[in-house]
């Protein structure tokens, strides 16, 4: 094949592959017609001891623009547990506070990608609180929860970088 004909042939092949990927739903795009809730259950503890009377604030970013508004404020149960039912295809932030401890935030992106699940998704998490001895705090969420397309379930990553709060 002549060099001038190779480039158009490659471009045509890429275009056909891209079209096939979209046609088969092979690319991770949010599926907006899935309705339901993500059932989130969290246990707060220090070491192995469950913490009671922890303040928990739920924020919702309804437009997904990074502007969170408080939607609910609760106190954890005596066993240190609390739960929320979060709308799918939304963004949330959960803030966990207790006097004398470093505040922690959890970010939730409940977009469900190419899911064929018919069961109600759930996510269980243990948050280990630390006494605030150094005056530092977490500026970013300590965990980000998201739908893992490869695992076909919700998963998380952590960021435990502490910085001075001004």
Image (cartoon, grey):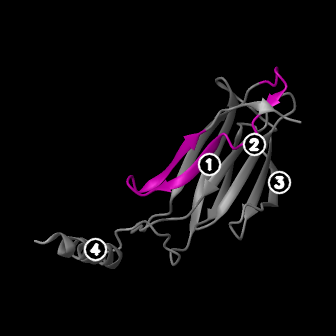
Q: Is residue 10 above or below residue 95?
A: below
Which dot marks residue 77?
2
On whether residue 152 falls in the magenta region, the answer is yes
Closest to the camera, between mark 3 and mark 2, is 3
Distance from disc 2 to disc 4, alpha carbons, whole Å, reads 60 Å
Callout 3 touching callout 4 (CB < 8 Å):
no
Report how far apart the C-alphas of labels 2 and 1 lie in the structure: 12 Å
Question: Which mark is first along the chain, 1 or 3?
Answer: 1
Q: Which mark is residue 73?
A: 3
Q: Nearer the viewer, residue 96 or 122?
A: 96
Q: Is residue 102 visible?
A: yes
Q: Nearer the viewer, mark 2 or mark 1?
A: 1
Give the foreground label among 3 and 4: 4
**Relative to residue 52, is residue 60 depicted above or below?**
below
Q: Which residues are magenta?
A: 131-158
**Among the 4 quarters of the image, the one containing residue 128:** top right
Taking the spot 64% from the left edge, 44% from the top edge, the residue there is 42
> For mark 1, what is the residue?
41
CB-based contact (under 8 Å), mark 4 and mark 1: no
Give the mark nearest the N terminus, 2 or 4. Answer: 4
Q: Quadrant of the N terminus?
A: bottom left
Residue 93 on the magenta span: no
In 3D space, how far apart are the residues under numbered discs 3 and 4 (Cα atoms)? 54 Å
Horizontal relation, residue 8 to residue 127: left or right: left
Tag 1's secondary structure? strand
Measured in 3D between alpha carbons, the distance from the residue under mark 3 to the one under mark 2, in whole angstroms, is 13 Å
Q: Residue at left 76%, top 55%? A: 58
Q: Quadrant of the C terminus?
A: top right
Secondary structure under tag 2 reads loop
Pick whichever of labels 2 and 1 is earlier in the sequence.
1
């Amino acid at each position: 094949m002549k060099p001038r004909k190779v480039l158009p042939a490659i471009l045509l092949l890429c275009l056909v592959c891209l079209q096939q990927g979209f046609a088969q739903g092979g690319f991770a795009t949010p599926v907006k017609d899935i309705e339901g809730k993500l059932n989130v259950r969290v246990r707060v503890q220090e070491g192995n001891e469950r913490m009671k009377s922890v303040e928990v604030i739920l924020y919702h970013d309804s437009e997904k623009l990074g502007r969170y508004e408080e939607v609910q404020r609760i106190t954890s149960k005596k066993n240190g547990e609390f739960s929320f039912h979060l709308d799918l295809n939304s963004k949330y932030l959960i803030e966990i506070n207790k006097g004398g401890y470093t505040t922690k935030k959890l970010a939730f992106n409940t977009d469900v990608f190419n899911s064929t699940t018919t069961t109600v998704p759930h996510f269980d998490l243990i948050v280990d609180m630390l006494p605030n001895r150094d005056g530092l705090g977490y500026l970013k969420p300590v965990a980000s929860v998201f739908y893992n397309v490869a695992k076909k379930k919700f998963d998380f990553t952590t960021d435990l970088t502490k910085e001075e709060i001004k």
